[in-house]
Amino acid sequence: MKEVRTLFFSATDNTRKMVQSVADGLSKGLSCPISENNNVTPFASREKMYCFSGDCVAVIGFPVYAGRIPNKILPFFQNNVKGENTPAIAVLTYGNRAYDNALREIQQVLHKNGFVVIGALTQPSQHSFSSSVATGRPNNEDLAKAEEFGLSLAKKILAGNISDCLPVDEGELVYYTPLTTHGNKANILKVMPESRRDLCDSCGDCALRCPMGSIPKETPWETTGICIKCHACITHCPKGARAFTDEVFLSHKEMIEQNFSARKESEYFI
């Protein structure tokens, strides 16, 4: 292999960290450079094609939303990321609940688009909705293990073993249904973050961070388009001016904190 290339969607930076650590291990093990890091989080970055030749190793990562690849990002992944029998490592981060159908989905898409998934990693991470669920993960230990995983994959490649790490499962994929603390369906699709005008200094950082291009730079206290609840605008706001205040959303957040705070471990497939 001549190079390692990455592609990732990472609104709160956790997926990027994991992808980078795996790529670092691969690069060291294969003695070849990481030639390109493709951050497809910015809205404009998803307007072009990303093609990976068979001479490279691709490390491709997404967060898990409702048990699958984020539905508003999925069409880009399906249509704009292509391989040529390219070895790929799939990296998924999830908010400590479950990755559900996301591993099957990322494998399905990569397989259909010309990749061979030689390795996969699922990483419990701090939930974007709550700082008290999997706090601080991925941590330094997680990142070190991800780099070791990359080194193991390099050995697999050098041994000439370019094969799927898991059987390709073409079964039906379903989304997780968010619930409230009372077990009712939490319909949060149209919920938008609120902004405190008294705290907002119009720096525009949230507008730059929004992966859907839904925050106007001229009026950053507004959300005028689709919101995928990624929390990029909240996580990166230097003034703490944005937050979700909807009662149903907050009940779903509380349900997650009550039921999914126990530590979970990373899973590696090779």
Image (cartoon, rainbow, N blue to C red):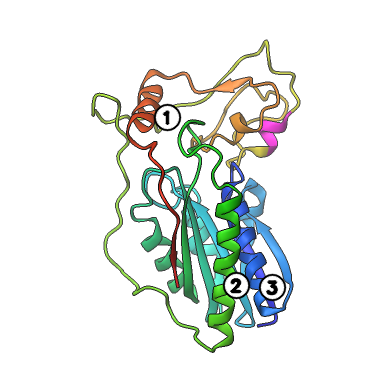
Mark 2 highlights which residue? 151
Q: CA distance from mark 1 to mark 2?
A: 43 Å
Q: Residues within 10 Å of mark 3 (few under 14, many from 20)?
A: some
Labelled disc at residue 35: none
Check disc 2 and give the amino acid type. Leu
Residue 9 among magenta residues: no
* Residue at 29% across, 32% down: 179
First-in-chain label (3 vs 2): 3
Of residues 207 and 88, the one drawn nearer to the viewer in this rendering: 88
- First in sequence: mark 1 vs mark 2: 2
What range is drawn magenta here? Answer: 204-208
Q: Where residue 109 sits: x, y (%)? A: 44, 66
Quarter of the picture containing the N terminus is: bottom right
- Pinpoint residue 93: horizontal percent, then vertical percent: 49, 51
Lateral position of residue 250 relative to residue 222, left or right:
left
The residue indicated by pointer 3 is 28
Identity, as a three-letter code, of the amino acid under mark 3: Lys
Q: Which mark is residue 190?
A: 1
